[in-house]
Image (cartoon, rainbow, N blue to C red):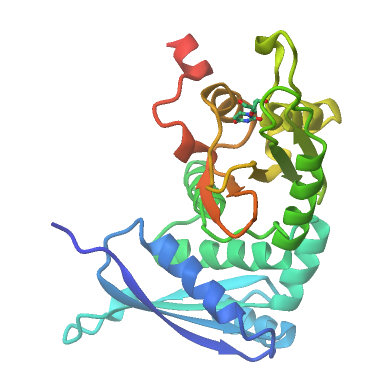
Amino acid sequence: MKKKSEVTLDYLDECHLDKSLEKMFLLVASETLERFSLGKCTISLSLISENKMRNMNKKYRNIDRTTDVLSFAYLENDDEMSDIKDLGCILIDPKRAKKQAEEFSHPFKRELSFLFIHGILHLLGYDHQNEEDSEKMFALQNEILNNLTIDFYTDQKKLKKELKIAQSMAITPYSHFNVGAVLITKSGEYIRGFNIENSSYPATICAERVAIYSAYSRGNNKDDFVAMGLITSSNETSTCCGVCRQVMIELLPSYIPVYIYNDKMDKMLRLTVKDMLPYAFTDEDLKS
Ligand code: THU
């Protein structure tokens, strides 16, 4: 059996950013390398200034301008005596990352992670010299980024507050089981839903679907959603019904987290949309 990867990060922050970033980068490295069987390995990461980046780009690539990320692989001169593989060194200019994050209107940490994953894939031999290679590299890069267990978007405090409001709006004269749902979008919207019951019982609609349909009716698309929250009247973290899971797998990205709270909000379960409906029936089945 091939050994999994176990990475050590040799981290240097010359720009003196938030100390918690080191932990984030380590998690990004391990979740990226988890997909490859490399055994024990190390990666160096340095956050450097624009000036230094420009000098490095000039010195090693003969390109006289700055850039966002540079990778230098050490694979060729691997130390035969050691069982720890040194994958190489990655340089990132965080100031430039910040600018790019603002341009794309996404969180700074997401951009840093994106650049780091890009750098790691270069160390592993991926490249974007031609269209085919570039498609392969970018597809894998996005896949890794989307499936990180790090959530760059959700403010749990705000989510909890919005969930309580949504739950309080539930219309439940029959079950008195109040459910609140909140969908979070990339642009920072928190869209509420709640269950609405009817004396003709099957006409009842669940909170999840109210939130999803409401979000779509405001003009959002599948790719706009970054997380979902749920709260029910239960003492436990009770999950979604089958019909909602089917709607969720079709109308939400399958990799987004779903945070499920119990009524008191002292218990939380984190699942992804795809965790909730394995072997789902989708539009792909209709085509095959
Ligand atoms: N309910 C939801 O809102 N979401 C679910 O996923 C499970 C059930 C609602 C529907 C109904 O109003 C009440 O809970 C009892 O089934």
Q: Is residue 259 above or below residue 173?
A: below
Q: Is residue 137 above or below residue 11?
A: above
Image x and y of residue 265, in percent: 64, 56
- Residue pushed farthest left? 1
The residue lying at 74 percent from left, 62 percent from top is 157
Q: Is residue 113 above or below residue 7?
A: above
Between 124 and 208, the one nearer to me in the picture:
208
The residue lying at 18 percent from left, 83 percent from top is 80
* Quadrant (top left, top right, bottom left, bottom right) of the C terminus: top left
Residue 130 visible in the snapshot? no
Image x and y of residue 169, in percent: 82, 37
Quarter of image, ligand 1: top right
Horizontal side, residue 165 vs residue 77: left or right: right
Between 270 and 216, the one nearer to me in the picture:
270
Between 62 and 181, the one nearer to me in the picture:
181
The residue lying at 72 percent from left, 39 percent from top is 180
Image x and y of residue 198, in percent: 75, 15
Quadrant of residue 98 within the rendered picture: bottom right
Number of marks present in the image shown: 0
* Quadrant (top left, top right, bottom left, bottom right) of the N terminus: bottom left
Quadrant of residue 195 within the rendered picture: top right
The residue lying at 74 percent from left, 20 percent from top is 197
Residue 120 visible in the snapshot? yes
Horizontal side, residue 206 vs residue 286: left or right: right
Horizontal side, residue 286 vs residue 181: left or right: left
Image x and y of residue 219, in percent: 84, 30
